[in-house]
Amino acid sequence: MNSNIDASQAVAAPAFTRKGADSPPVLVYEHVRKTYGDFVALSDVSLQVNKGEVMCLIGPSGSGKSTLLRCTNALETLNGGRVLLDGVPLPTRESEVRKVRQRMGMVFQGFELFPHKSALDNVAMGPITVLGMPEAAARDRARALLDKVGLSNKADNFPANLSGGQQQRVAIARALAMEPEVMLFDEPTSALDPETVGEVLNVMKKLAQEGMTMIVVTHEMSFARRVANWVVVFENGAILEEGPPTQIFENPKVTRTRDFLSHLGWDG
């Protein structure tokens, strides 16, 4: 009898609660499919991203991570399923797509800065040309953002006179200048020298701490382990598994996830 009472009074370990789970998700992917001819890049991908959450997409190269990111802001058209931003499906008309892209900042592997413009002008250009902001106000915003990414002393430098890490931080500042709701990072450190990777990851970590909603395609497992709130493992255009970093990196449910991390030398 006493053993039954003890069992009934036992307290189960609390279930993991995702960050932002008490609010409607910012992004929802419903059965997303993307093909290129006979090649299936994404197959039946369903996910959600909550407000203030950092979601890291990991997995082998060519597994669909970057394709999903490009589908997120309609740089790629879907062959099936849909993506919803704040509960509304992404539009298909180009004029409406442009408005959606203003709400999502994207940072690519390459820095894609205008080589003939200074760091300050690269950052200020979007607010001036797209948002119609007065030039003085846009340049003030640009200076504040360059300071935010640790480049206040490089405002007048042209991209050719900046290191790769500095150029990528300018690219982050440029994306932030549009005051996006979501930041998308497509392997932002893959083109950098090892010594400059940390300076970019530190800026991204700071954004995460400030509550920016972020989706990050990355091969930086330490960043995913320490900064992400939710990790999604891709292979062959499909989701292998998803969960909090502690699950994915310490106790993966799928053998293939364990093999992938082991191949990268991940030891927890």
Image (cartoon, rainbow, N blue to C red):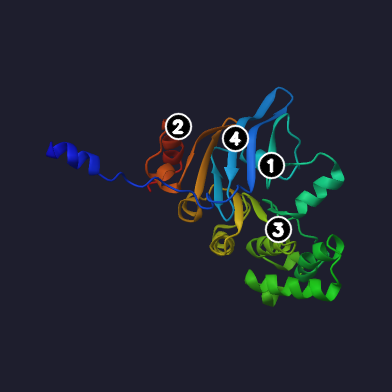
Q: Estimate the x, y position of residue 173 in percent, counting from the top left.
A: 69, 64
Mark 4 vs 1, N-terminal side: 4
The crowd level at tag 4 (other Cα within 10 Å; few <14, some 14-19, many 20+) is some
Circle 1 or circle 2, nearest the eye: 1
Check the image and report above or below for 88 versus 189: above
**Residue for badge 4:** 46
Q: Mark 3 falls on what kind of element? A: loop
Q: Estimate the x, y position of residue 132 in percent, counting from the top left.
A: 86, 65
Q: Mark 2 falls on what kind of element? A: helix
Type of amino acid under label 4:
Ser
244 or 251, which lies in front? 244
Type of amino acid under label 3:
Pro
Q: Mark 4 falls on what kind of element? A: strand
* Observer able to see residue 157: no
* Observer able to see residue 124: yes
Type of amino acid under label 2:
Arg
**Residue for badge 3:** 180
